[in-house]
Image (spheres, rainbow, N blue to C red):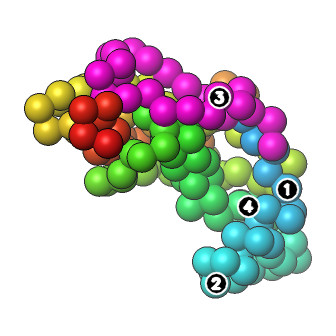
Amino acid sequence: MLDNDIRHTIFLEDLEIGMKRDLTKLITDEDIEKFAEVSTDRNPVHLDEEYAKETMFQGRIAHGMLTAGLISAVIGEQLPGHGTVYLGQTLKFMAPVRPGDIVLVEVEVAEIDHKKRRVKLFTEAKIGDQVVLRGEANVLAPSRKLD
């Protein structure tokens, strides 16, 4: 994995609108195979090149939720980080991710409700300039006062 390796918690009291964190990951055949194993999603469009060539994708693609999982990695490890609880996530898949693609996932603080400890995050994944996934996450952020 190639990433910016920031591993810590940003507490609710220190969050600011516009804060961003990111992660870059090379998607490998092994990643796709492991995700299929863990998720039990063995759709041949992910695992069988001959099958996938006959689909609209004209070749194998990674599971969409594998890419979405990278968003979770940024949220759980970087922004806000350890102690964050996911409340919800919207996802719009805009283009396929293929084995060998380098995906950049970015998470940005959009709104903060200090009283409820809730934070809305804009989430996006790109391959180069192409957006492949976009959405919003709602999380319960860790607080120095309560955790």
Position of residue 50 measured from the top left corner of the image (x, y, whole percent): 88, 76
Tell me the SS state at disc 1.
Answer: loop
Name the residue: 80% across, 36% down. Answer: 2
- The quarter in which the N terminus is drawn is top right
Write down the region rendered in magenta: 1-23
- In front: label 3 or label 4: 3
Occupied quadrant, residue 139: top left
User: For the residues marked 3 and 2, what is the alpha-carbon distance in whole angstroms?
Assistant: 31 Å
The answer to if 13 sits in the magenta stretch is yes
For the residue marked with disc 2, what is the amino acid? Thr
Give the side of residue 123 with respect to residue 101, left or right.
left
User: For the residues marked 4 and 2, what is the alpha-carbon distance in whole angstroms?
Assistant: 16 Å
Q: Nearer the viewer, residue 18 or 125?
A: 18
For the residue marked with disc 4, what is the amino acid? Ile
Position of residue 25 measured from the top left corner of the image (x, y, whole percent): 75, 41
Tell me the SS state at disc 4.
Answer: loop
Where 117 falls versus 83 (above or below)?
A: above
What number is the disc on residue 62? none
Q: Does residue 35 appear in the picture of this structure?
A: yes
- In front: label 3 or label 1: 3
Q: Name the N-terminal-most of marks 1 and 4.
A: 1
- Can you identify the residue that label 4 sits on? 61
Position of residue 86 measured from the top left corner of the image (x, y, whole percent): 36, 52
Q: Are marks 2 and 1 in contact (CB under 8 Å)?
A: no
Occupied quadrant, residue 12: top left
- In front: label 3 or label 2: 3
What number is the disc on residue 40? 2
- Can you identify the residue that label 1 sits on? 28
